[in-house]
Every structure is written in C-alpha cells, then in structure tokens.
Image (cartoon, rainbow, N blue to C red):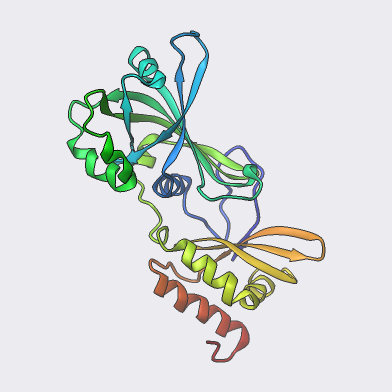
Amino acid sequence: MVTRPQHAGGPPAASTAPEPPFAERARTLLHVGRHGALATHARKRVGFPFASVMPYGLDAEGRPTLLISTMAMHTQNLLTDPRASLLVAHPGWTADPLAGARVTLVGEVRRLESGALVRDEYLTRHPNARHWVDFDDFAFFRMEVADVYYVAGFGAMGWVDAAEYGAASPDPLVDVEAAIVDHMNDDHADALVVYCRHYAGVEAESAAMTSVDRLGFRIRARTGDRLQGLRINFPTEVRSSEQARRVLVAMLREVRGDDAP
C-alpha cells in the first residue's frame, strides 16, 4: 500500500499503491490555483519569451480564461502571436519549490467574442475583477490547450495528453484537503506514525501528512536525521471528508485491534 518517489521521465510506474493519473492531478492543481506565470512571445524582442503574473479562471474543460487589457504588454504580444504557456505552482507551498507540484499548459490564447460563459466563474475566483471587468479595454481570452506538462515533485513528471486533461475532473477531496491534512497533523500525529510502521514498513519516529486524495495520502516521515516521503493508499476510494475520516479510523483499528476514536 505504499510507493516511494520515482525517478523517471514520465508518470510513476504502476505499483500496488496507485495514485490518481497525471491528467487528474493537473486538473486538480489548476482548480486550487488562482494565478500563474504566462509566457508570451515578445513583440519588442522577437524570439524572446515574455513572462507575466496572470490570474486565471477555468472553463468546464479546464481551459484557462484570462481577463486582460489591450494596454498590457502580454495582450499586445498575444494579438501578434497567440502561442503561449501558463505555469501554475501549488499555492501555499512553502517547502523546497522543486519538491512541489506544478503544471505547464501550452496552447494558443485568443480573445473570446463573448465572455458571458466564463464571466461568472472568473469573478467567483477573482471578485476584485468586478471593478474593471466592464472597462472598454478589458476582454476575456481563453487558452486552447495543446499540451500539458505535469511535475509531481522530485523525479516524477511527464507529458499529459490535452484531451485526457480536458476530460479529467479535479480530485473530489480537493476542497477539503487542507482541513483533513491540518486535522491529522494537529490531532492525530501518533496515528500517522502507526500508518508508517504498519502500512509502509518504515520505523518512523515522527510523521506529517502532506497531501490526501481520493486514493490515499502522502506522509513525510522522520527517522533519526532521515526524512522520506511515503505514499499510503486507502483500502477503498473516498470522495468526502466524512468517508476519509471513517477509512482512516478503520485503518488505525485494523492495526491496533481496538476501538480507536
């Protein structure tokens, strides 16, 4: 029920502890993110990339939507050459940036004739944009995703087919993940050590949950001076915080053979 980081140029090899596919994980990351770095082709310096901080929305197929002004340099670049990429890193990640998840979308960004279909979703993500959304020089643009590159962390990365990305859905636990992780770390750190020892065979002295998804969770385990990342899967898929609580309790009871709270 455990995997360790893979060192390869593509998705981790199949194991007894499968993780959600990269397409789903990329969609999940774009769902929780709110802004990224947009790289366009510089009009002033032909052949050079030009990067900008870019808030974004998402349509039903995971295509980024942008509310941008014609006065902005990136907009002028896009009107000359629509090819661009958008890099989004996991929001709130404070550890080594190279160990955090990130995704790069590549495609063409073009103005939408009508922004009505994407307006509400964008303003839900970025309520301050209501102050300028109706300015004459602002308009909605959308990226038609041609390719996706996802990096899960050290040694785990690969290309994702654009059609697979568009058909994927964010992980069902994404909006409650932070609450689950905080609760386990604050109130059940001892249980995390038990999971490491029983399900991963690692004699951890301390442990912290770092992420959770519908199939399982990741733990950073410490043994002496050694830190290592572990993947432990649920015995069954979970799709809500209550299901996650029940399964985590059941896993602890299985180990202890008692009525763990």
Residue 194, image x, y percentages: 66, 77
Residue 65, image x, y percentages: 32, 35
| In the depicted structure, whether residue 5 falls above or below residue 76 | below
Residue that sits furthest to the right in the current view:
225
The reply to whether residue 151 is in sight is yes
Camera-side residue: 27 or 95? 95
Lateral position of residue 233 relative to residue 98, left or right: left
Lateral position of residue 220 relative to residue 170, left or right: right
Q: Residue at x 38, y 66 (%)?
A: 239
Residue 220, image x, y percentages: 66, 61
Residue that sits furthest to the front in the current view:
131
| In the depicted structure, whether residue 124 falls above or below residue 48 | below
Residue 228, image x, y percentages: 71, 58
Q: Quadrant of residue 15?
A: bottom right
Lateral position of residue 175 relative to residue 261, left or right: left
Q: Residue at x 53, y 67 (%)?
A: 182
Q: Residue at x 40, y 59 (%)?
A: 175
What is the number of callouts on the image?
0
Residue that sits furthest to the bottom in the current view:
258
Q: Quadrant of residue 61?
A: top left
Rendered-image quadrant of the N terminus: bottom right
The reply to whether residue 201 is in sight is no
Camera-side residue: 110 or 166? 110
Camera-side residue: 258 or 226? 226
Camera-side residue: 232 or 207? 207
Lateral position of residue 19 relative to residue 243, left or right: right
| In the depicted structure, whether residue 106 falls above or below residue 1 | above
